[in-house]
Image: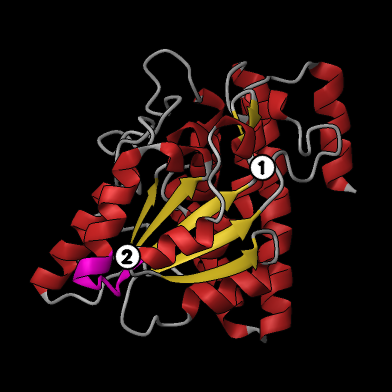
Amino acid sequence: MTAADDAWGHASELRRQVEAVEPGRRADLLARTAQDLRATIVRTVAGAGIGHLGGDLSVIDILTTLYFGVLRVRPDEPGWADRDRLILSKGHSAVSLYAVLARAGFMPEGLLQQFACPLSPLGAHPNRRKVPGVEANTGALGHGLPFGVGCALAARMDGSSRRVFVVLGDGELQEGSNWEAAMLAGHRRLVQLTAVVDRNGLQQGARTEDTNRLEPLADKWRSFGWEVEKVDGHDHGALLAVLTRSPADRPRCVLARTVKGKGVSFMEGRAEWHHRVPVLAQVEAALKELAG
Protein backbone atom coordinates (compact mmCIF):
# COMPACT_ATOMS: atom_id res chain seq x y z
CA MET A 1 0.00 0.00 0.00
CA THR A 2 1.37 3.42 -0.94
CA ALA A 3 1.39 6.47 1.35
CA ALA A 4 -1.40 7.95 -0.74
CA ASP A 5 -3.46 4.76 -0.40
CA ASP A 6 -2.89 4.78 3.34
CA ALA A 7 -3.95 8.44 3.61
CA TRP A 8 -7.11 7.77 1.62
CA GLY A 9 -7.93 4.76 3.77
CA HIS A 10 -7.53 6.86 6.93
CA ALA A 11 -9.72 9.62 5.49
CA SER A 12 -12.36 7.16 4.33
CA GLU A 13 -12.50 5.58 7.76
CA LEU A 14 -12.83 8.97 9.44
CA ARG A 15 -15.67 9.91 7.09
CA ARG A 16 -17.40 6.57 7.75
CA GLN A 17 -17.07 7.10 11.49
CA VAL A 18 -18.58 10.58 11.22
CA GLU A 19 -21.52 9.23 9.21
CA ALA A 20 -22.06 6.20 11.46
CA VAL A 21 -22.21 7.72 14.93
CA GLU A 22 -25.12 9.60 16.48
CA PRO A 23 -25.12 13.41 16.07
CA GLY A 24 -23.62 14.18 19.48
CA ARG A 25 -20.61 11.91 18.99
CA ARG A 26 -20.33 13.03 15.37
CA ALA A 27 -19.71 16.59 16.49
CA ASP A 28 -17.17 15.40 19.07
CA LEU A 29 -15.25 13.45 16.43
CA LEU A 30 -15.12 16.49 14.15
CA ALA A 31 -14.04 18.71 17.04
CA ARG A 32 -11.14 16.39 17.91
CA THR A 33 -10.08 16.31 14.26
CA ALA A 34 -10.20 20.10 13.99
CA GLN A 35 -8.17 20.51 17.18
CA ASP A 36 -5.50 18.16 15.85
CA LEU A 37 -5.45 20.09 12.56
CA ARG A 38 -4.92 23.33 14.51
CA ALA A 39 -1.63 21.93 15.76
CA THR A 40 -0.73 20.92 12.21
CA ILE A 41 -1.45 24.47 11.03
CA VAL A 42 0.73 26.04 13.73
CA ARG A 43 3.64 23.72 12.88
CA THR A 44 3.25 24.35 9.14
CA VAL A 45 3.19 28.13 9.39
CA ALA A 46 6.04 28.20 11.89
CA GLY A 47 8.16 25.90 9.73
CA ALA A 48 7.62 27.99 6.62
CA GLY A 49 7.95 31.36 8.34
CA ILE A 50 4.91 32.62 6.46
CA GLY A 51 1.15 32.29 6.75
CA HIS A 52 -2.08 33.69 8.15
CA LEU A 53 -2.54 31.86 11.42
CA GLY A 54 -5.44 33.93 12.77
CA GLY A 55 -7.76 33.17 9.88
CA ASP A 56 -6.52 29.59 9.53
CA LEU A 57 -7.49 28.88 13.12
CA SER A 58 -10.86 30.62 12.87
CA VAL A 59 -11.96 28.74 9.73
CA ILE A 60 -10.66 25.24 10.45
CA ASP A 61 -13.83 24.05 12.23
CA ILE A 62 -15.87 25.07 9.18
CA LEU A 63 -13.56 23.29 6.73
CA THR A 64 -13.33 20.16 8.90
CA THR A 65 -17.12 19.94 9.12
CA LEU A 66 -17.52 20.41 5.38
CA TYR A 67 -14.92 17.87 4.28
CA PHE A 68 -15.68 15.14 6.81
CA GLY A 69 -19.39 15.64 7.39
CA VAL A 70 -20.96 17.33 4.39
CA LEU A 71 -19.16 17.26 1.03
CA ARG A 72 -19.64 14.51 -1.53
CA VAL A 73 -16.07 14.15 -2.81
CA ARG A 74 -13.70 11.36 -3.84
CA PRO A 75 -10.11 12.10 -2.82
CA ASP A 76 -8.95 9.16 -4.94
CA GLU A 77 -10.81 10.69 -7.91
CA PRO A 78 -10.53 14.48 -7.40
CA GLY A 79 -11.88 15.24 -10.88
CA TRP A 80 -15.14 13.29 -10.38
CA ALA A 81 -17.70 15.29 -12.40
CA ASP A 82 -20.53 15.19 -9.85
CA ARG A 83 -18.41 16.04 -6.81
CA ASP A 84 -19.52 18.90 -4.59
CA ARG A 85 -17.39 22.02 -5.02
CA LEU A 86 -15.69 23.81 -2.15
CA ILE A 87 -14.18 27.20 -2.95
CA LEU A 88 -12.06 28.84 -0.27
CA SER A 89 -12.49 32.45 -1.29
CA LYS A 90 -10.27 33.67 1.57
CA GLY A 91 -7.29 32.10 -0.15
CA HIS A 92 -4.78 33.58 2.31
CA SER A 93 -5.95 30.83 4.71
CA ALA A 94 -4.48 28.24 2.36
CA VAL A 95 -2.73 26.32 5.14
CA SER A 96 -6.06 25.37 6.72
CA LEU A 97 -7.27 24.09 3.36
CA TYR A 98 -4.05 22.15 2.73
CA ALA A 99 -4.21 20.59 6.19
CA VAL A 100 -7.77 19.37 5.63
CA LEU A 101 -7.06 18.15 2.09
CA ALA A 102 -4.07 16.19 3.36
CA ARG A 103 -6.07 14.66 6.22
CA ALA A 104 -8.84 13.81 3.73
CA GLY A 105 -6.40 11.91 1.51
CA PHE A 106 -6.02 14.27 -1.43
CA MET A 107 -2.26 14.40 -0.84
CA PRO A 108 0.31 12.98 1.61
CA GLU A 109 0.38 14.81 4.93
CA GLY A 110 4.17 14.97 4.72
CA LEU A 111 3.83 17.38 1.79
CA LEU A 112 2.74 20.07 4.25
CA GLN A 113 6.39 20.43 5.25
CA GLN A 114 7.01 21.90 1.79
CA PHE A 115 4.52 24.73 2.24
CA ALA A 116 5.85 27.93 0.63
CA CYS A 117 9.16 26.29 -0.31
CA PRO A 118 10.65 27.06 -3.75
CA LEU A 119 8.90 25.03 -6.49
CA SER A 120 6.48 23.51 -3.97
CA PRO A 121 2.89 23.00 -5.21
CA LEU A 122 1.72 24.39 -1.86
CA GLY A 123 1.95 28.12 -2.36
CA ALA A 124 0.80 30.90 -0.06
CA HIS A 125 -2.48 30.84 -1.98
CA PRO A 126 -4.10 27.67 -3.41
CA ASN A 127 -3.60 26.73 -7.06
CA ARG A 128 -6.04 24.31 -8.68
CA ARG A 129 -3.49 23.22 -11.28
CA LYS A 130 -1.01 22.11 -8.62
CA VAL A 131 -3.04 20.79 -5.69
CA PRO A 132 -5.68 18.03 -6.00
CA GLY A 133 -8.95 19.06 -4.40
CA VAL A 134 -8.48 22.79 -4.94
CA GLU A 135 -11.34 24.02 -7.13
CA ALA A 136 -10.25 27.62 -7.75
CA ASN A 137 -7.17 29.81 -7.51
CA THR A 138 -8.06 32.31 -4.81
CA GLY A 139 -6.38 35.06 -2.90
CA ALA A 140 -7.56 38.11 -4.84
CA LEU A 141 -10.41 38.75 -2.42
CA GLY A 142 -13.96 39.00 -3.67
CA HIS A 143 -13.59 36.49 -6.51
CA GLY A 144 -14.61 33.24 -4.84
CA LEU A 145 -18.35 33.90 -4.69
CA PRO A 146 -18.63 34.96 -8.35
CA PHE A 147 -16.78 31.76 -9.27
CA GLY A 148 -19.13 29.74 -7.07
CA VAL A 149 -22.17 31.30 -8.73
CA GLY A 150 -20.80 30.17 -12.09
CA CYS A 151 -20.28 26.65 -10.72
CA ALA A 152 -23.85 26.54 -9.41
CA LEU A 153 -25.24 27.75 -12.73
CA ALA A 154 -23.19 25.10 -14.54
CA ALA A 155 -24.56 22.39 -12.22
CA ARG A 156 -28.10 23.48 -13.03
CA MET A 157 -27.39 23.48 -16.77
CA ASP A 158 -25.83 20.01 -16.49
CA GLY A 159 -28.83 18.68 -14.56
CA SER A 160 -26.42 17.68 -11.78
CA SER A 161 -27.25 17.50 -8.08
CA ARG A 162 -23.74 18.62 -7.11
CA ARG A 163 -23.61 21.41 -4.56
CA VAL A 164 -21.34 24.42 -4.30
CA PHE A 165 -19.98 25.79 -1.01
CA VAL A 166 -18.04 29.06 -0.91
CA VAL A 167 -16.17 29.95 2.29
CA LEU A 168 -15.59 33.69 2.57
CA GLY A 169 -13.78 35.94 4.98
CA ASP A 170 -15.91 38.70 6.46
CA GLY A 171 -13.40 41.40 5.53
CA GLU A 172 -13.60 40.48 1.86
CA LEU A 173 -17.32 41.27 1.87
CA GLN A 174 -16.19 44.87 1.54
CA GLU A 175 -15.44 43.96 -2.11
CA GLY A 176 -18.33 44.91 -4.39
CA SER A 177 -17.92 41.87 -6.65
CA ASN A 178 -19.45 39.74 -3.89
CA TRP A 179 -22.69 41.70 -3.98
CA GLU A 180 -22.95 41.51 -7.77
CA ALA A 181 -22.64 37.74 -7.43
CA ALA A 182 -25.10 37.62 -4.53
CA MET A 183 -27.64 39.57 -6.58
CA LEU A 184 -27.40 37.13 -9.50
CA ALA A 185 -27.56 34.06 -7.24
CA GLY A 186 -30.68 35.39 -5.54
CA HIS A 187 -32.30 36.28 -8.86
CA ARG A 188 -31.58 32.80 -10.28
CA ARG A 189 -32.59 31.09 -7.01
CA LEU A 190 -29.47 28.94 -6.98
CA VAL A 191 -30.54 26.47 -4.30
CA GLN A 192 -27.38 24.39 -4.77
CA LEU A 193 -25.22 27.31 -3.62
CA THR A 194 -24.20 27.92 0.00
CA ALA A 195 -21.98 30.78 1.16
CA VAL A 196 -20.31 30.37 4.55
CA VAL A 197 -18.90 33.55 6.06
CA ASP A 198 -16.05 33.16 8.55
CA ARG A 199 -17.31 36.05 10.71
CA ASN A 200 -14.36 36.57 13.05
CA GLY A 201 -14.81 40.34 12.99
CA LEU A 202 -11.17 41.14 12.23
CA GLN A 203 -9.19 41.84 9.11
CA GLN A 204 -5.63 42.97 8.48
CA GLY A 205 -4.88 45.62 11.07
CA ALA A 206 -8.31 46.33 12.54
CA ARG A 207 -11.89 45.27 13.18
CA THR A 208 -14.13 44.97 10.13
CA GLU A 209 -16.63 47.37 11.64
CA ASP A 210 -13.95 50.02 12.12
CA THR A 211 -12.54 49.56 8.61
CA ASN A 212 -15.77 49.50 6.60
CA ARG A 213 -18.90 48.53 8.52
CA LEU A 214 -20.68 45.36 7.38
CA GLU A 215 -23.62 45.24 9.77
CA PRO A 216 -26.51 44.63 9.48
CA LEU A 217 -24.93 41.78 7.52
CA ALA A 218 -27.82 39.29 7.66
CA ASP A 219 -30.23 41.91 6.33
CA LYS A 220 -27.91 42.62 3.41
CA TRP A 221 -27.89 38.97 2.31
CA ARG A 222 -31.65 38.67 2.74
CA SER A 223 -32.19 41.77 0.62
CA PHE A 224 -30.41 39.99 -2.24
CA GLY A 225 -32.80 37.03 -2.00
CA TRP A 226 -30.79 34.66 0.18
CA GLU A 227 -31.87 32.49 3.08
CA VAL A 228 -29.69 33.38 6.08
CA GLU A 229 -28.67 31.26 9.06
CA LYS A 230 -26.51 32.35 12.00
CA VAL A 231 -24.40 29.76 13.84
CA ASP A 232 -21.46 29.44 16.17
CA GLY A 233 -18.67 28.67 13.70
CA HIS A 234 -16.86 26.53 16.28
CA ASP A 235 -19.90 24.37 17.11
CA HIS A 236 -19.61 21.33 14.87
CA GLY A 237 -23.08 20.09 15.70
CA ALA A 238 -24.64 23.42 14.73
CA LEU A 239 -22.55 23.58 11.56
CA LEU A 240 -23.56 20.04 10.58
CA ALA A 241 -27.22 20.79 11.15
CA VAL A 242 -27.32 23.86 8.94
CA LEU A 243 -24.93 22.64 6.22
CA THR A 244 -26.70 19.32 5.69
CA ARG A 245 -30.22 20.77 5.62
CA SER A 246 -31.58 21.48 2.15
CA PRO A 247 -32.52 25.11 1.54
CA ALA A 248 -36.11 25.83 0.53
CA ASP A 249 -36.03 27.71 -2.76
CA ARG A 250 -33.05 30.06 -2.70
CA PRO A 251 -29.31 30.16 -2.03
CA ARG A 252 -28.21 30.03 1.58
CA CYS A 253 -25.77 32.19 3.50
CA VAL A 254 -24.40 30.84 6.78
CA LEU A 255 -22.98 33.55 9.00
CA ALA A 256 -20.58 31.58 11.18
CA ARG A 257 -19.46 33.60 14.19
CA THR A 258 -15.85 32.69 14.91
CA VAL A 259 -12.82 33.86 16.89
CA LYS A 260 -9.67 34.83 15.06
CA GLY A 261 -6.81 32.67 16.35
CA LYS A 262 -9.27 30.23 17.97
CA GLY A 263 -7.63 27.64 20.24
CA VAL A 264 -4.53 29.61 21.15
CA SER A 265 -5.29 32.06 23.94
CA PHE A 266 -2.63 34.64 23.11
CA MET A 267 -3.78 34.76 19.48
CA GLU A 268 -7.53 34.85 20.04
CA GLY A 269 -9.23 38.07 18.98
CA ARG A 270 -5.92 39.77 18.14
CA ALA A 271 -5.69 41.57 14.78
CA GLU A 272 -1.89 41.31 14.71
CA TRP A 273 -2.16 37.53 14.28
CA HIS A 274 -3.72 38.01 10.87
CA HIS A 275 -0.32 37.18 9.34
CA ARG A 276 2.16 37.13 12.22
CA VAL A 277 4.49 34.12 12.51
CA PRO A 278 5.16 32.74 16.02
CA VAL A 279 8.67 32.38 17.42
CA LEU A 280 9.79 29.05 18.88
CA ALA A 281 8.61 29.76 22.43
CA GLN A 282 5.18 30.78 21.11
CA VAL A 283 4.98 27.66 18.96
CA GLU A 284 5.73 25.47 21.97
CA ALA A 285 3.16 27.32 24.09
CA ALA A 286 0.53 27.07 21.36
CA LEU A 287 1.08 23.33 20.82
CA LYS A 288 0.96 22.66 24.55
CA GLU A 289 -2.33 24.57 24.83
CA LEU A 290 -3.84 22.76 21.85
CA ALA A 291 -2.77 19.37 23.19
CA GLY A 292 -4.43 20.14 26.50
Query: Residue at 71% of width from left, 62% of height from top?
Result: 31
Q: In the image, what residue type sits under mark 2?
A: Asp
Task: Give 137 or 148, whichever is nearer the viewer.
Answer: 148
Query: Residue at 70% of width from left, 28% of height from top?
Result: 271
User: Quick check: can you spot residue 2?
Assistant: no
Residue 96: quarter of image: top right
Q: In the image, what residue type sits under mark 1?
A: Leu
Location of residue 103 in the rendering, given as x and y in whole percent from the top left corner: 54, 51
Q: Is residue 185 left or right of residue 119?
A: left
Q: Is residue 204 magenta?
A: no
Instruction: Pick whichever of labels 2 and 1 is earlier in the sequence.
Output: 1
Q: Dot 2 corresponds to which residue?
A: 84
Q: Dot 1 corresponds to which residue?
A: 57
The residue at the far left in this view is 157
Location of residue 127 in the rendering, given as x and y in whole percent from the top left corner: 32, 33
Query: Residue at 58% of width from left, 19% of height from top?
Result: 50
> What span is colored magenta in the figure?
186-193
Task: Give 255 or 214, whichever is nearer the viewer.
Answer: 214
User: Quick check: can you spot residue 46?
Assistant: yes
